[in-house]
Amino acid sequence: MKIQTKVKLNSSNEMPMLALGVWQSGELTKQAVLTALKNGYRHIDTAAAYGNEEAVGEAIKESGIAREDLFITTKLWNEDVRQGKTEEALKSSLKKLGLDYVDLYLIHWPAKGYVDAYLEMEKLMQAGYIKNIGVSNFKKHHLEHLLAHVHIIPAVDQMEFNPQMQDEELYQFCKENGIVLEAWSPLGSGACLKIPAIISIAEKYRKSPAQIILRWLLQKGIVILPKSVHEERIIENAHLFDFKLQEEDMETMNSLNQNLRTGPDPDNFHF
Ligand code: A2P
């Protein structure tokens, strides 16, 4: 089963379009990552703030998969952005992960000081600790501000994006600027699985609602990071390449937006 469609980043590096998300995977993180890797996933998305970089690192080591065949993302936490501790934070993440570089390092939220943090990340990339740099939870106006002050265009922006939360302005801006959009909470933390229109499309293709949502995102060119700690779901979420949504169904999915966030608004977060 092919599950490794890749997207070319503006750095010219390639990134697998399907990743396992591990936010809130807790004690089950190591097992979930091992299950994903066993089933063909090669991209894992973690963050310093998730508190599970060690578990991800243990799974990577135990999997025996060659480092160059993996794509590992982690993120710089807000307090480290505010305190100008980018280098320290990255080195701490690398140590926990047991790696000497990450494939993608993201600024987790647009916390005060993000331009300076990003400039520091540019240097750390040149020093070989990071292959690609990007941001997370940046709206269009945050990206515009960043682009005006930095040298390297972010490779990705990772944002909450699912059928009920579609930031069309950001989607277009990323497309126009060669920034790959990544969807966190692609299933709306599970809430989107109950939307009747999605259930009915799922019946038409004999797929699950999760597979319909993930396939819709892939066809839009958006990278997906579904989180699950259950083997059958981890496998299900990767079986997306033996069918294609027709244009009318893509349009139905596009029409489900309600600007309904499950997470905080990047213009108004208090952490
Ligand atoms: P679990 O980890 O218990 O399997 P999102 O990635 O949008 O945040 O959604 C994650 C939530 O959706 C988690 O609660 C996860 O539960 C659940 N989930 C993930 N994949 C599936 C699936 N294929 N079917 C049903 N629920 C899923």
Image (tube, grey):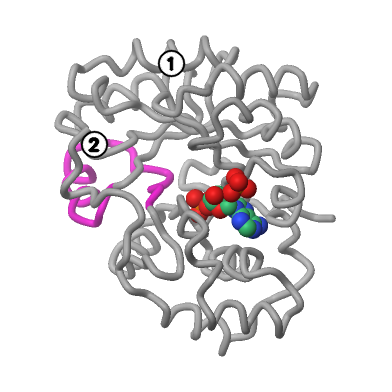
**In the rendered image, which residue does mark 2 sit on?**
150
The dot on residue 136 is none
Badge 2 crowding class, 10 Å Cα cut-off, few under 14, some 14 to 19, many 20 or more, is some
- Say if mark 2 contacts mark 1, CB within 8 Å: no
Q: Nearer the viewer, residue 261 or 215?
A: 261
Badge 1 crowding class, 10 Å Cα cut-off, few under 14, some 14 to 19, many 20 or more, is few
Distance (Cα) linking label 2 and label 1: 17 Å
Residue found at x 57% / y 85%:
249
- Occupied quadrant, residue 250: bottom right
Q: Nearer the viewer, residue 95 or 229?
A: 229
Percent across and percent down for residue 235 are 76, 50
Q: Which amino acid, by three-letter code, is at mark 1?
A: Ala
Tag 1 secondary structure? loop
Mark yes or no: residue 102 visible: yes
Residue found at x 41% / y 55%:
178
> In the picture provided, is 114 more to the left or to the right than 100?
left
User: Residue 250: within the magenta?
Assistant: no
Percent across and percent down for residue 77 are 32, 26
Instruction: Please report whichever mark, 2 or 1, sits nearer to the chain's N-terminal start.
Output: 1
The furthest residue to the bottom: 248
- In the picture, which quadrant includes the C terminus? top left
- In the picture, which quadrant includes the N terminus? bottom right
Figure check: 97 above or below 207 = above
The dot on residue 127 is 1
The furthest residue to the right: 1
Q: Which amino acid, by three-letter code, is at mark 2?
A: Val
Percent across and percent down for residue 86 are 30, 18
Instruction: Please report the bounds of the magenta region as a residue range.
Output: 138-159
Mark yes or no: residue 225 visible: no
Residue found at x 50% / y 78%:
253
Residue found at x 53% / y 25%:
102
User: Residue 141: within the magenta?
Assistant: yes
